[in-house]
Image (cartoon, rainbow, N blue to C red):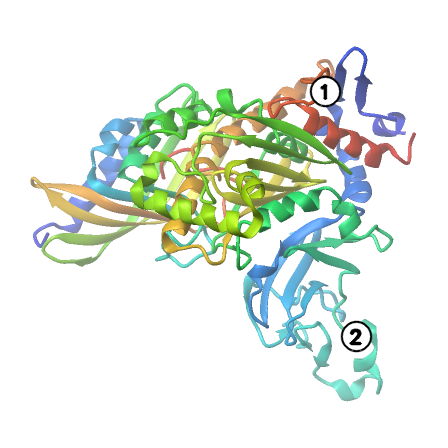
Amino acid sequence: MQNISRADVEDFLFAEAELLDEWRLPEWLELFTDDAIYYVPSTDVPADSSPDKNLFYVADDRFRLSERVKRLMKRTAHAEFPHSRTRHLVSNVRIRGRNDDEMEVAAAFITYRTKDGVTDTYFGSNRYRLVAENGRLRIKEKRCLLDSEGLRTQGRVSIIL
Amino acid sequence: MNAFQRMNTALMVDEDRQIFKVSRQAFVDPDILEAERTRIFDKCWLYLGHASELAKPGDFVTRQVGGRSILFARDAKGTLRAMFNTCPHRGAQVCREKHGNAKSFQCFYHGWVFGLDGALRSQPGDASYAPDFKERSTSSMQQVSRFETYRDFCFVCFDKNAESLDSYLGAVKEYLDVIADQAEMGMTIVGGTQEYSMRANWKLLTENSIDGYHALTTHATYFDYLKATNGGLAPVPLDGAARDLGNGHAVLEYKAPWGRPVAQWVPMWGDGGKREIDRLYEGLVTRYGEERAKRIALYNRNLFVFPNLVVNDIMAVTIRTYYPQAPDFMTVSAWALAPKEETDWARKYRLFNFLEFLGPGGFATPDDVEALEQCQRGFRNATEAQWNDISKGMGKAVPAYDDELQMRAFWSNWNKHVFAAQV
């Protein structure tokens, strides 16, 4: 992971955001390793908390993440039918640490979701653990730390943050 | 006279013809919300928190309850205290943190310091005050006049003359017992609060929390997910009964195919999980006998305590309470409850289970939020399309878990409170 630049990481995260905004979720899922995890902790626990001991909003292993994607692509995922429109903005990208196998990345985000005349804003920091597989970056962990106090007024995390 | 003052009921009921309708004005009229504040939230027992949240002396949480700002603390002697979070001097909120541990509370405005019991300890410039100033009860933080607990569930009531919590809960107590008896060492709130909101009237969440009828359609994708999990479901069809518990309280009690951490095994938990679930079940049998063990372990409960507390003992246990901020907007707080002595394995699967269904990031709750918000949008037509129908199961001796008896129990009591002064 020593020869990967911040520009490489930014390109990867911007491409991820585009897949989410275009609702290409099955392709987005391919960005994750087979043992990946995706977490959205509740906002009154420390950033590095474990979902085994604390109540989160989302704590998916790779299987449940793939089921989340399957669900969101169905008409019967009522919260997202018809699909909301979203814009994921990614900024303040920093490589926080790296070794031969893995790198830690932090990126600030603002995500707008609009549906039925209502626009909600999600904001916070995404913490990634990235690995290289066959010469391409893959996500081993994505931990979405919301800065808001709970989900008021967003009410739900029915999209991927 | 406004439209609400001209009404003397929001219900249209004819038992013989199995008609039970609710006026949609109840979901949209600001004057009805104002009446709810004074006739329901100022009169009924309201959930404040769980004693386990304040494990040690000095532990505190601040909460919004019934429109009030409450400081809930365990004092130096270990006694639980519910206080109005306002300085007796000039009114500022004394404690501004959501939770923590303190030796005392200090109002930052003029520096008054209060003990964990709310008693005034010191104030800058005390020589300028009357000699007995500190001893006057009006110099200390005001205690909520009615604060009572049942099995570690802590409640407040802002009506000095209200009946006791014990009498108010009535038949609910037996269900809280069944839930609390899952644990040998007592139940505890797990770290992490889910705080969210919905652009919908608060009573829609009351209905939704005890609605067995919507599960298969609203939550179709959740059942798809369960079928896809490794090994699938327990061979248990959804089946059970609804009960009116009096005072507007109600419960659904039913069997369901999902795993229960205490204690219904599903194949995805594997052989190790089976041993753990069997051990938990045997423990229940030893403590309570076969019949009660079966009820605790294998039955689910959606318990509703009037007006706004839900304790769902399903694929995990959640406590949920919610308040109107406007006719079309509510805030919701939800916690996970678990046995204190639970193993790491069981705690992990409990929380994993919790999130697959419950909460605003789960596979089910977002669709509930959508349903409730769509109802609220539909109520824009309330002037012309005036009535909700909740008559399902009226003709039955024992209504099923997917009938609407429990909602009729809620609405009958709601109607009694809101219109008592106008009948």
Tell me the tag on residue B70: none
Q: Is residue B74 above or below residue B63?
A: below
Residue indicated by mark 1: B397
Residue B144: give x, y in percent of width and height: 76, 61
> Could one spot residue B274 in this view of the protein?
yes
Residue A30: give x, y in percent of width and height: 20, 33
At 76% across and 51% down in the image, what residue appears? B166
At 48% across and 42% down in the image, what residue appears? B316
Question: Which image quadrant for residue B11?
Answer: top right
Residue B176: give x, y in percent of width and height: 64, 47
Q: Residues within 10 Å of mark 1 (few under 14, many from 20)?
A: few
Q: Nearer the viewer, residue B251 or B86?
A: B251
The quarter in which the C terminus of chain B is drawn is: top right
Q: Nearer the viewer, mark 1 or mark 2?
A: 1
Q: Chain of mark 2?
A: B
Q: Name the amino acid type tagged 2.
A: Ser
Residue B263: give x, y in percent of width and height: 46, 42
Q: Name the amino acid type tagged 1.
A: Ala
Is disc 1 placed on a helix, strand or loop? loop
Is A123 on the left-hand or right-hand side of A117? left
The quarter in which the N terminus of chain B is drawn is: top right
Residue found at the very far top of the displayed protein: B17
Q: Give the mark nearest the N terminus, 1 or 2.
A: 2
Residue indicated by mark 2: B139
At 66% across and 62% down in the image, what residue appears? B71
Is B410 on the left-hand or right-hand side of A131? right
Q: Residues within 10 Å of mark 2 (few under 14, many from 20)?
A: some
* Count of number-bearing discs: 2
Is disc 2 placed on a helix, strand or loop? helix
Q: Chain of mark 1?
A: B
Q: Is residue A145 above or below residue B306?
A: below
